[in-house]
Amino acid sequence: MHIAAHGVGRLSRLIAGCAGIAVAVCGVVSARTLDDGGPPEGYSSTPAVALIPAGIALLVQAAPISGGRAGRLRAGAAVLFALIATGLAAVALVDQPAASVATLLSGLALACFDLRLPRQDGSMPFRVADPLLLGAAVIALVALVPRLFAPAFPPGRGPDSVMSLPQAGALLVLTAGAVLARSLDQADLRQRPLVEELRDREDFAQTLLQSMNEAVMVLDANYRVIDVNRRWRELTGYADDDLARDPPPLPPPGSGGDWTIPRADGTAVPVLATMAAIPDAAGTTRGYVATCVDIAERKHAEDALTEHAAELERGNAQLASALAFKNDLTSMLTHDVAQPISSIASLAELLCADWADLPDDIRLELATKIDKNTRRLVKMMNDLQLLFRLDTGSVTARRVPAPLHEVVRTVSATMAGDDVEIAIDEDLAALIDRGHLTVVVENLLKNALTHGAPPIVVQAEPQGTTVLLVVQDSGPGVPEAVLPGIFGRFSRGAGLGLFIVRHLVEANGGTVRYEHATPQGARLLVTLERAPA
């Protein structure tokens, strides 16, 4: 609306200014020729000379200058030229009364152009120039219209005796231009508050848009960017030229949701985005408004809370594991460790009390049992020490080529004697810490001897880059209910042996698993890296 009013105002001012120029030119031409066609005696003998300042006054009145010092100078100049035209018309009032009166009224109208008188009913003020312009226009029309009926006039009394044709036309143009300028002035007065209101609303909308904490982007119906606010530029790092040349991706339509908005530097910002349509009165979409709220801090807080919750879960798991370890250790100390200690204590008390009465063979038998239980207790303490080291991750493996046949033969000679059958090539070796290999074989043979039945077979065979070591017994095998935790810590019926086996084998880069033997028995299979020949 503001643009349209501005265009109409420029056109109206142009027409009024052109009218003023035409009137001034017509006054110059008409003033040089008397009505009878003779040479001029002077410009004061005809009111046509008054058309010159009147036209200039109209031209100045139509100039696009308003407000301030320049506006006051424009109004003063227009009044000055209008008064000059009024004076010149008054001088010629006796010679040509009709033309002089019309010119005088036009000059007074231009002089009183901005003069308004208030009405008693409070309506629009009365403009003094309106009746003056109307009178001038009536006189000019009275001079022009009878020319259509020139044949009806008696000789010497034609219409030219009232006013010459150029003067009448110039006066009509002058009054029309003044009316146009007056209408323009009234339109300016009416439209100025509307334009100011529109401008205030636009400024308020821009201020509101730019002061919002949310990033806002306004688009037309074709998704072209119309405007963005300050927060959007800060959030994305884009300038206005960048947005026009390379529009950013738009958030998904809908009521809102988490989205990632790309920045000009290549990074991305997590936001809560909405994309809403702007309908007109008929419901047709005129544009869209996209809003984004920075939720980077919220995301960081959520991630921190998630990580803290995960740490708490890990801590709870560690506490639960430590509690289970304590309970299992307490149970083992109560049962497994207390038994050899009680046996040692009772046997030692019997020896001390009845030493003199006991024969030598009974003494030897009791001492042998004490030694056996002591070794068993020492083995348990060593296993517990190794268990603590495994639990804290302080066990390291120094892998060297270890001959499997030699290690198995040495361990079986001290544990099982003839109950173990060894089927291993003497040249076959594995890359493993030799001390760890000894402990692994000891625990596997102990498990077979304790829970299985002879014959016990230990065999090994190369399989490409690995070696498969198998310990098989002929017992009932491991029950299905026990299998899931057979290599766990303090597994029921297995003690610490298989748990230590699993950790030591894994520390040396190998694996251990269980299989049922055919037709019966248990097979424990250890896979290790083969040593080079």
Image: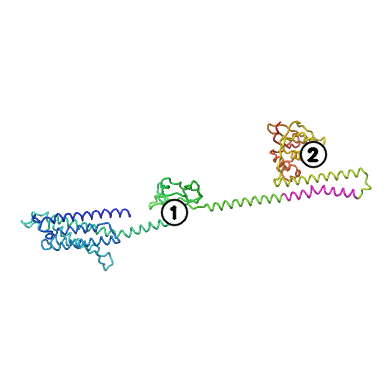
Label 1 neighbour load within 10 Å: few <14, some 14-19, many 20+: some
> In this rendering, would 494 be left or right of 226?
right
Q: Find the residue positioned furthest to the right.
A: 357
Give the overall secondary structure of the magenta segment. Answer: helix
Residue drawn where x is 17% and y is 54% of the image: 25
Q: Find the residue positioned furthest to the left.
A: 155
Residue drawn where x is 61% and y is 52% of the image: 309
Quadrant containing the N terminus in the rendered view:
bottom left
Q: Amino acid at mark 1?
A: Arg
Q: Earlier in the sequence, mark 2 or mark 1?
A: 1
Label 2 neighbour load within 10 Å: few <14, some 14-19, many 20+: many
Q: Is residue 351 magenta?
A: yes
The answer to whether the residues at label 2 and label 1 have Cβ atoms under 8 Å apart is: no
> In this rendering, would 408 be left or right of 275?
right
Q: Amino acid at mark 2?
A: Leu
Instruction: Pick the residue in front: 272 or 264.
Output: 264
Residue segment shown in magenta: 325-352
Query: On screen, 501 above or below 69?
Result: above
Q: Is residue 47 magenta?
A: no
Which quadrant of the view contains residue 9?
A: bottom left
* Residue under label 2: 449
Q: Position of residue 326 (x, y in %)?
A: 73, 50
> In this rendering, would 420 be left or right of 116?
right
**Real-space CA distance between mark 2 and mark 1, rounded to the nearest whole angstrom:** 81 Å
Instruction: Pick the residue in front: 272 or 511.
Output: 511
Query: On screen, 459 above or below 307?
Result: above
Q: Position of residue 432 (x, y in %)?
A: 72, 37
Q: Nearer the viewer, mark 2 or mark 1?
A: 1
